[in-house]
Image (cartoon, grey):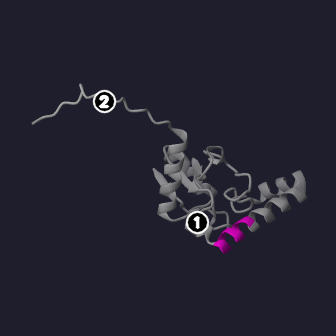
Amino acid sequence: MYNFGSPRVGNKKFSEVYNEKVKDSWRVVNHRDIIPTVPRLMGYCHVAQPVYLAAGDPKNTMDNMELLEDGYQGDVIGEATPDVIVSEFMKGEKELIEKILNTEINIFLAIRDGSALMQHMEDFYYITLLENVRSNYRTVPRPQLTEEKNISIG
């Protein structure tokens, strides 16, 4: 099963059961698509096998990463249960708060400039996939045809 740009659709238990039952499931997400980040609270979770796409330089293409560097897709609180939040606070309250703030600021800026919704459109998924294919695969040169090999049917 492949889906593109889907929001979170269930709680942690739902995602665990889904992941157990549907082994070949892929969730393709454009890096700045806002839709996969909602709903942000109330324990909603994504199912497994994310494939994050980023346009441009192939080194920016992220495949199956749990958390992107800017935290945009990795929503720090949205999928966390209270025990996870408490353990994160114990690791470093200041760093966690900075991460949450930076994530929220990045999402707000993407909403404000319109890129968050544009990245959700089908055309942008197509363009990003095409760019990734072009940057990761080399084309095989075609052999030159000589006049001797040209055959005309007439």
Give the residue at mark 1: 35
Which image quadrant is residue 94 in? bottom right
Q: Nearer the viewer, residue 105 or 35?
A: 105
Are there few (<14), some (14-19), or many (20+) residues within 10 Å of tag 1?
some
The residue that appears at 57% across and 49% down in the rendered structure is: 51
The three-letter code of the residue at mark 1 reads: Ile
Magenta segment: does it hold 108? yes
Q: Circle 1 — which element?
A: helix
- State the residue in front, 83 or 30: 30
Closer to the observer: label 2 or label 1? Answer: 2
Q: In the displayed structure, would residue 16 be above or below residue 136?
A: below
Q: Residue at x 48, y 44 (%)?
A: 24
Position of residue 29 measured from the top left corner of the image (x, y, whole percent):
57, 55
Q: Residues within 10 Å of mark 2 (few under 14, many from 20)?
A: few
Determine the residue located farthest toward the top in the rendered image.
148
Cα–Cα gap, marks 2 and 1: 50 Å
Which quadrant does the C terminus fall into? Answer: top left
The residue carrying mark 2 is 145
Give whichever of discs 2 and 1 has the lower sequence position: 1
Q: Position of residue 60 (x, y in %)?
A: 65, 48
Provide the residue span drawn in magenta. 106-113
Q: Secondary structure at mark 2?
A: loop
Residue type at mark 2: give it: Leu
Q: Name the side, left or right, on which 116 lies relative to 140.
A: right
Q: Is residue 149 left or right of residue 7?
A: left
